[in-house]
């Protein structure tokens, strides 16, 4: 990582700044341009809004004023019958060493970094770590969570957890973080990091009112970057650009990288998205190399880790095609520990935040995805064949055959879904594409040529199974310039993000068009011009929406990544959000992370009595907390959550939140 400052900031801070560098060279109209154009024709605010609110948004685009107008109109029309769909008392926003959950709820640790996963796994000894031990233990930086019930039992099932990345300064005693040249890197440390990436499958069960891990489960599994063999399938599998010296067939690959969010298919498999794969590669290709432009569009090589010093496959000079084998959606069968995960290339190669499937009304499977970088795009994949609930074998390869689409948001409030199909439009030999494999390997460049709309870091893109509306979490964009001011960025740069709502026509996810609107502009309503409803309290607003989930009632729950003491005066956590009626746009604070942690997941049990959340990189970013004021390390962390044991470092952990009386969440 060329701009990593190991002595002044955490790896995750540098990780975030590196992701702040857009790699999209196009001049396609941005979402800001579109929002401005769309709403210049609309009426300005209607009465009832205070002068201070208007003044605070005079620099914003017309859509920001429209959103406030809608809030004002809703406020004027409120009656005594207006009902809050979320029945809990809010958590107070703030920052401290531990977690907080709404009154009447328990938040229990389910599993922590280093806890046993496989039968016979050694006990966690943070001062004497090894790659072999880590391959049997729960990995680092738990992210996406997916729950698959066993025998239809909502209180017994398998939990899948992604392990996105590692923080050396918080993992290893006496380390402090890598320097620019990786002089303090060793192969042992690199191998431990590779073993800590990937994913875990654990069996869990509710007994005596509490969830716990089932020990020595036959389903237990660790999938790692270091050793797990995976298959490549779909149009890009076997293509010459996927072949390496270790795999002349172009059909197998060891491990997956930087897996962020994901989804669960109707047939019970896990979809896990490889996100910032570019950061793991070292070396430098010459400009005349066939893959140079491809890798530049993805920001590879990023050089965040020292792995290329010890493993040739991460050196793009020695293996210039290896990076093409990452950046895919991986499908995992949690019920079969002997099965090989499969990278489904038909879903495109990008920095996948996740993959959220829904069954369309015609039975086809639709998967929504975001490409998590500033000025990149929103996608969906539609399978060619329909899901067959009566024939599980027929669904096994549904995701190998279908069409990938990218979104263009128009100024009239419509969305066009543009097909990325070889031979159509600009996706031809004239632009360097010789097959559908080329289109998928270079998904970003293909989307550039189609004129997709550059977005403000599209992360989770989740369909609501109750309403069929799709919600796009746009986390932030600090690179948006002042002359591109819009609803997402009333202050010039956009550090706070927003949420877009997409409505498919007649509930048809297969349609080529849809409509879009703004659910909320995030940040402080007082300082940032955010458009939360007037019913939102000081604790209820948030910045940096990242992941989201829907409970069985179709209510929206949002997890954040980027709040801190310095910028927003609050830790990341979980907020409930109203999406309909007079309280639309109301946020309500449910769970708060310990200092430095990001909230990932979240996932509800089928009966809504449990909410599983992943607390990632606790203690990170100690320099942003006024009570600590310095970089966190293994030996000097801002918190020792969750153990609070001087012999233990801070540990990423999965928690389960439940109501004390056993009822439904919220």
Image (cartoon, rainbow, N blue to C red):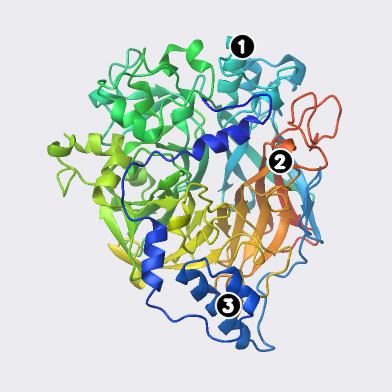
User: Gap in Å between the C-alphas at discs 1 and 2?
Assistant: 27 Å
Write down the quadrant of residue 252 in the picture: top left
Q: Which mark is residue 188?
A: 1
Residue at x 47%, y 60% (from the top left corner): 485
At label 3, counting other C-alpha atoms closer than 10 Å, the crowd grade (few under 14, some 14-19, many 20 or more) is: many
Rendered location of residue 612, percent (x, y): 66, 49
Q: Which mark is residue 71?
A: 3
Q: Which label's residue is closer to the chain start, 1 or 2?
A: 1
Residue at x 53%, y 59% (from the top left corner): 498
| Residue situated in front as seen by the camera: 6 or 587 | 6
Rendered location of residue 227, percent (x, y): 50, 19
The reply to whether dot 1 and dot 3 touch (C-beta < 8 Å) is no
| Residue situated in front as seen by the camera: 363 or 18 | 18
Rendered location of residue 405, percent (x, y): 30, 51
User: Relative to 171, is 199 on the left or the right?
Assistant: left
Question: In the structure shown, which secondary structural element does the residue marked by tag 3 occupy?
Answer: helix
Q: Which mark is residue 596?
A: 2
């Amino acid at each position: 990582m060329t701009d990593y400052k190991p002595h002044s900031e955490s790896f995750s801070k540098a990780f975030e700044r590196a992701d702040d560098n857009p790699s999209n060279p196009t001049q396609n109209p941005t979402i800001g341009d579109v929002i401005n154009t769309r709403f210049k024709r609309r009426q300005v605010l209607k009465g009832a809004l205070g002068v201070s609110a208007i003044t605070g948004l005079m620099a914003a685009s017309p859509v920001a004023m429209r959103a406030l107008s809608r809030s004002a109109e809703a406020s004027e029309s409120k009656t005594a019958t207006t009902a809050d769909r979320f029945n809990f008392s809010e958590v107070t926003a703030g920052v401290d060493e531990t977690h907080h959950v709404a009154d009447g709820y328990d938040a229990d640790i389910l599993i922590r970094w280093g806890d046993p996963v496989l039968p016979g796994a050694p006990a966690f000894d943070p001062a004497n770590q090894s790659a072999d031990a880590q391959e049997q233990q729960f990995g680092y930086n738990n992210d996406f969570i997916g729950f698959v019930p066993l025998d239809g039992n909502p209180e017994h099932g398998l939990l899948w957890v992604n392990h996105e990345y590692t923080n050396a300064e918080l993992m290893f005693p006496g380390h402090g973080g890598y320097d620019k040249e990786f002089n303090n890197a060793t192969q042992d440390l690199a191998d431990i990091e590779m073993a800590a990436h990937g994913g875990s499958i654990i069996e869990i069960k509710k007994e005596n009112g509490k969830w716990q891990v089932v020990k020595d489960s036959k389903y237990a599994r660790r999938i790692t970057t270091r050793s797990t063999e995976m298959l490549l399938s779909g149009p890009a599998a076997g293509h010459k650009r996927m072949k390496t010296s270790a795999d002349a067939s172009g059909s197998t690959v060891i491990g997956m990288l930087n897996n962020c969010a994901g989804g669960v298919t109707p047939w019970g498999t896990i979809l896990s998205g490889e996100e910032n794969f570019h950061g793991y590669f070292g070396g430098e290709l010459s400009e005349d190399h066939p893959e140079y432009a491809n890798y530049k569009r993805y920001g590879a090589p990023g050089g965040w880790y020292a792995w290329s010093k010890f493993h040739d496959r991460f050196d793009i000079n020695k293996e210039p095609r290896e990076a093409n084998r990452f950046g895919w959606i991986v499908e995992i069968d949690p019920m079969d520990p002997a099965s090989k995960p499969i990278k489904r290339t038909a879903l495109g190669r990008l920095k996948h935040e996740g993959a959220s499937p829904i069954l369309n009304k015609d039975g086809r499977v639709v998967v929504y995805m975001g490409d998590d970088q500033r000025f990149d795009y929103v996608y969906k994949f539609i399978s060619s064949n329909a899901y067959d609930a009566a024939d599980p074998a027929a669904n096994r390869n549904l995701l190998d055959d279908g069409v990938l689409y990218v979104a263009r948001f128009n100024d009239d409030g419509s969305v066009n879904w543009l097909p990325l199909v070889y031979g159509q439009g600009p996706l031809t030999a004239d632009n360097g594409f010789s097959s559908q494999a080329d289109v998928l390997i270079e998904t970003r460049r293909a989307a550039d040529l189609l004129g997709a709309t550059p977005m403000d870091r599209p992360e989770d893109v989740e369909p609501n199974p109750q309403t069929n509306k799709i919600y796009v979490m746009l986390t932030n964009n600090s690179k948006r310039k002042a002359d591109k001011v819009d609803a997402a960025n009333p202050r010039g740069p956009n550090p706070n993000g927003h949420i877009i709502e997409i409505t498919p026509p007649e509930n048809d996810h297969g349609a080529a068009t849809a409509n879009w609107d703004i659910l909320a502009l995030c940040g402080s309503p007082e300082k940032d011009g955010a458009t939360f409803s007037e019913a939102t309290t000081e604790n209820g607003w948030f910045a940096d929406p990242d992941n989201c989930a829907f409970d069985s009632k179709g209510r929206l729950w949002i997890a954040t990544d980027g709040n801190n003491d310095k910028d927003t005066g609050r830790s990341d956590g979980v907020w409930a959000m109203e999406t309909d009626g007079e309280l639309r746009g109301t946020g309500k604070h449910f769970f708060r992370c310990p200092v430095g942690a990001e909230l990932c997941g979240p996932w509800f049990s089928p009966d809504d009595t449990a909410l599983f959340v992943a607390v990632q990189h606790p203690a990170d970013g100690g320099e942003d907390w006024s009570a600590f004021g310095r970089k966190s390390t293994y030996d000097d962390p801002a918190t020792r959550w969750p153990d609070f044991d001087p012999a233990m470092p801070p540990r990423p952990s999965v928690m389960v939140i439940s109501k004390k009386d056993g009822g439904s969440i919220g």
